[in-house]
Amino acid sequence: MRSSLIFLTAVCALAQTPAPLPSAPPERLTLQDAEAQAVKNHPQVSAALLAAAAANQVTIEVRSAALPTLTGSLTAAGAINNSRLAAGNLNNPTIYNRISSGITASQLITDFGRTASLTTSARQRAEAQQDNAVAIRANVLLQVDVAFYSALRAQNVLAVAQETVSNRQTIA
């Protein structure tokens, strides 16, 4: 698109007709502004950062296997008098209304290093995801730099072409 605009401008200059003007002046970006916008808005950067955050949560999840576990339960059954239905099922008619509850606490005593190995593996995966996010960010910045300097080169080529046309018109 840019090269066709440059070509159109050069052809109009050679034909001594004014080039079509854009409706609004183009926004001038510095390299730092372009890089900041690209990092903020690029979907691959956002996805990589979210994947790294998710990998960090997996490390916490795996490490939780070594922590104590507390489980609670509550059970209730209601029976209708002279009926074989209780809690929606057929049962013995001598069952009465009842409620029961319980709490279970458990602690992993020994797992022969399995949890520690899984935690180390999850931590290394999280670090790899963070390194991947850094690499994707650097790749996006490289693409922005290439596009920025290509645009500068195109502007300089256009300036040289306009200067050449001006010199030729002066000589002619």
Image (spheres, grey):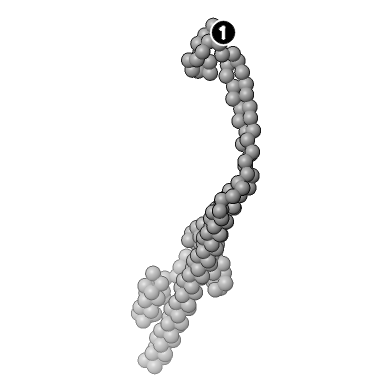
Residue 62: x and y in percent read 56, 51
Q: Is residue 57 above or below residue 127?
A: above
Residue sitting at x 62%, y 24%: 100
Q: Which structural element holds mark 1?
A: loop
Amino acid identity at mark 1 = Asn
Residue 147: x and y in percent read 46, 73
Asked which quadrant contains residue 102, the reply is top right
Q: Is residue 172 above or below residue 40?
A: below
Residue sitting at x 53%, y 66%: 131
Residue 158: x and y in percent read 43, 80
Q: How many discs mark residues in the rendered view?
A: 1
- Figure quadrant of the C terminus: bottom left
Question: Crowding at label 1, few (<14), some or many (≥20) Cα neighbours within 10 Å?
Answer: few
Q: Is residue 172 above or below residue 39?
A: below
Q: Is residue 43 visible?
A: yes
- Figure quadrant of the N terminus: bottom left
Residue sitting at x 39%, y 93%: 171
Residue sitting at x 56%, y 13%: 95
Q: In this figure, which residue is indicated by the disc labeled 1?
A: 81
The one of 87 and 93 positioned closer to us in this rendering: 93
Asked which quadrant contains residue 36, the reply is bottom right
Q: Is residue 164 above or below residue 36?
A: below
Asked which quadrant contains residue 96, the reply is top right
Residue 49: x and y in percent read 54, 59
Q: Is residue 38 visible?
A: no
The one of 53 and 101 positioned closer to us in this rendering: 101
Work out which residue is located at the far top of the displayed protein and give it: 82
